[in-house]
Amino acid sequence: MAEQQVWRKLGLTDREYDMIVEQVGREPNEAELNMYSVMWSEHCCYKHSLSSLKLFPTTGKRVIQGPGENAGVVDIGGGWSAVFKIESHNHPSAVEPYQGAATGVGGILRDIFTMGAQPVAFLNSLRFGNPDSARNRYLFDGVVAGIGGYGNCVGIPTVGGEIYFEPCYGGNPLVNAMCVGVMPTERLVLGKATGEGNLVVLVGARTGRDGIHGVTFASEELSEKSEERRPAVQVGDPFLGKLLMDATLEAIEKKLVCGVQDFGGAGLTCALTETASRAGTGIEIDLDLVPLREEGMHPYEILTSESQERMLLIIEPEKLAAVEEVFRRWELQLAVLGKVTGDGRVVARHHGAVVVDLPAASVAGGAPVYNPESREPEYFSRLAGFDPLTLPPPEDYNKTLLDLLSAPDIASKEWVWRRYDYMVRTCTVQGPGGDAAVIRLRETGQALALTVDGNGRHTYLDPYRGGMMAVAEATRNLSCTGAEPIGVTDCLNFGSPENPEIYWQFRQAVEGMAAACRALDVPVVGGNVSFYNEVEGEAIYPTPVVGAVGLIESPQQQCGLALRREKDLLLLLGPRETSLGGSQYLKSCCGKVAGSLAELDLVMEHRVQALLRSLIGRGLIASAHDLSDGGLAVALAECCLGGGLGAEVNLAQADSPLPAMFGEGPSRILMSVGPENQAAVVEAAGEAGVKICEIGAVTGDALIICHGGDIILKLKLSAMKKAYEEVFSCIME
Amino acid sequence: MKFGVIVFPGSNCDLDSYFLVRDILRQPVEYIYYYEESIKQCDAIILPGGFTYGDYLRSGAIARFSPVMSAVADFADRGGAVLGICNGFQVLTEAGLLPGALYRNDHLQFRCEQVYVRVENNSLPFTRSASLGKVLEIPVAHGDGNYYAPPELLREMKANNQVVFRYTDRDGNVTEGANPNGSVENIAGVCNREGNVVGMMPHPERAGEKILGSKHGLIIFKSIISYFLNREVV
């Protein structure tokens, strides 16, 4: 009996096991069953999410490669492409924060150069429990160190990111890493094992016993026993990663390879079965030829090890010598494991015996697709019904703003990003700290704007609208720099999809994101789903994270958030409606997560962003900043601190100061404009059908807000700066 | 004149120096790889930043054994101009071409930020176009930049005018707050006794264009170009 249930221990259900027996035509042996276990894990086969992911628009005039490959590829003109992807490394980071985060960065890096693209930037999206606990500070510090440890060493700048703290992430932090690369489009290489008789070659690190069943670990809930999963966490070697990147790119540039696949989750198993299945071919290898770190490794261990810094190359036999020369120059190991066959089977020998003989398409693509049960959670309508205006308003708005500026969610993250090399490659035109980062492209004279955005609290309160808002905010952030959004990649972090209420959150969020992508005309070209983010049945907030890429034709046209000149006018672009529901104010100042979010009109969102880009392109505005967490008051403070200039603002048009200052709503931009350009800006807004309102001017060394003839807030820049900038060094050191 | 940029396994600021020299200064420049045994008729050599050999063991400790380092040492012995930036500085101290050592930053964290450095010696090929006491805004990005030399050595270095740059505030004052890594006496860069080998932790190649935030780093490269121009005239 115990023996019969071995598949259950490997995370497969009885029904899945039956499917495997049927597809293989016999009972699989131990090595084969392990291969199915990793490839049919949620992490690899998306069995609970695939039916929903089909809702995303994945095509468009710029899309060269959508989801399904190692990364998405988007045309930026002139024969060049941007290549990008975001991926989670949550579970490893929960038990080993430094290596978990470092290998997350290494893994996403390989996904980009595997396609033939030179990586140019990293971003990341992080979630932790409140930093008042030592455990959460340890995880936070370790993750930041790991991201820097890998990224700094490989010499790709980490240019942007976001970090939020909520109790629900305490046991299950989120570490989502994004990498962006560029390449001449003709260089694109896919992960396909094409050409019968071609050689199957492994380059890079030796294979060890680390990371065995990492993907299975990623596809289960965390618990006290997760510490025992430490051996499932891989160890990164960024030095080797850098050499592998340079050598692989050189081999691709010299047209020496037909197919490239990195070893990510599920190791050799994934690389073999996916490349064969994509190409409709088979692969035959000898496991004795895999360079190992230790003796006595079982075939299944060799096949499922997730040892880092390894790549699979498919090369024509006559090019082997040239490939060897490229890799030898960097003192890298190269091993010919076998060859591409025509029978659609993945065959592996060990000590002369065939230990694996499976249909590649079944292992890589035969997993079932589920349509999980979905049910609206009880909390949803209860929390949506909460009216924040029933709470007493603050007595002192100065204190409210200072409290918000020093809330870890909002406070300056410089303590984090100064630990990342955000300048290496000397292309970083706008680094961390703004709405989006801007990277110039030496080769084409253009620039890319990059951002990651997600708000778990919003998505918890309203998964559909939260999903929409994540896409809207990400693209809005790009538009604030003047960039046209050209594609997104998403990382969907949720609890267990086998819980109908979680699945409802997931489905709603995906539907919202898909609707926003369609309305804003941005395709989803790749991404990652991370389920089972829960500890002892307590799930995280549903946290879809959107990584977005925008194109700036001329870097001279880009715009930042900092105020630039005294006497410039402050104009508020977009709808007036805000909500305190789900706001940062409600969380940080009232300790409540409740209420309903402001409405998002996608048609208006599209108009606002198009108008903003056109104003920046015409050189009419001096700065632009998206109104986000903390509403207008926080945005004003950030623009003032960015430029070292004060502002005087009159909320004459608002009935009540609280929602006007701290309410949050989408599609709103704070701009500073020279008086000479005011008329042209107002006229353009009128033509575009977008509301615009003059709210004040840049002046002095304090932020002053008036309402009904009274000064209701007055804070010196120095006081705001102290609140905003000293939080993390105080908490962490 | 021709610049050479040394590429070790793990160098990652090599292209930044290369592009600055080629595109901004418009001078000939060539990469020289770690396994090469000649510096290819270059007039000035740059050892760039990065993580040579992963900085495993100790920053720069393995790179100094690369074949190219004998050629670099010969070149330096003959009076050739050598600039080590960040990890390149660490390699030069490990190789014994520069005095002192670079420890882990005193706060134990990697630190990437704009800093100010003051020119303490403007008689060198790499600083001759700067006025003495000139304050330059140049970024740092390192984990092991905490310069140390024992008191006796430091005394000797100061007597020989071997301290080239010090971290200061914007106005050129040497303060504790302006020191990003705990370096002794705020030292950011030093030279050898002869003055032809300079090492510095800040990255002048990252401060060469207005769009990147500062052009102050150019003066170091312009100094070396003017040094060669003048020498050629003589």
Image (tube, coloured by chain):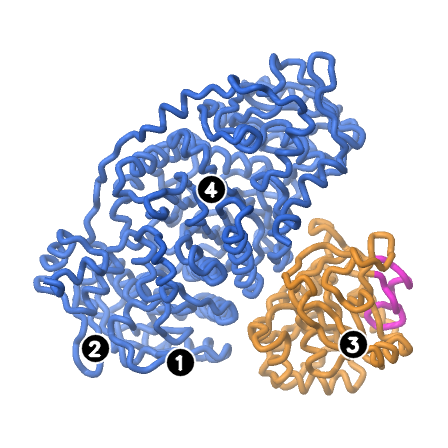
Chain colours: A blue, B orange
Q: Which residue is mark 1?
A: A321
Task: State the mark number for residue A349.
Answer: 2
Q: Secondary structure at mark 3?
A: loop
Structural crowding at the residue carrying mark 4, measured as other residues with C-alpha within 10 Å and reported as few (<14), some (14–19) or many (≥20): some
Same chain for mark 4 and mark 1? The answer is: yes
Structural crowding at the residue carrying mark 3, measured as other residues with C-alpha within 10 Å and reported as few (<14), some (14–19) or many (≥20): some
The residue depicted at 58 percent of the width and 32 percent of the height is: A626
Q: Left or right of B121: which side holds A470?
A: left
Residue B46 screen position, x and y as percent: 70, 72
Q: Left or right of A126: which side holds B138?
A: right
State how far apart marks 4 and 1 are (Cα). 55 Å
Letter of the chain that mark 2 sits on in the rendering: A
State how far apart marks 2 and 4 are (Cα). 49 Å
State how far apart marks 2 and 1 are (Cα). 25 Å
- The image shows residue B106, relative to residue A175, as above or below, that is below
State how far apart marks 3 and 4 are (Cα). 47 Å
Tally the numbered discs.
Answer: 4
Residue A713 lies in the magenta-colored region: no
Q: Secondary structure at mark 2?
A: strand
Select label 3 or label 1 by which is in front. 3
Same chain for mark 3 and mark 4? The answer is: no
Q: Which residue is mark 3?
A: B149
Select label 2 or label 1 by which is in front. 2
Q: At label 2, which amino acid type do we have?
A: Arg
Q: Nearer the viewer, residue A9 or A133?
A: A133
Q: At label 4, which amino acid type do we have?
A: Pro
Q: At label 3, which amino acid type do we have?
A: Ala
Task: State the mark number for residue A167.
Answer: 4
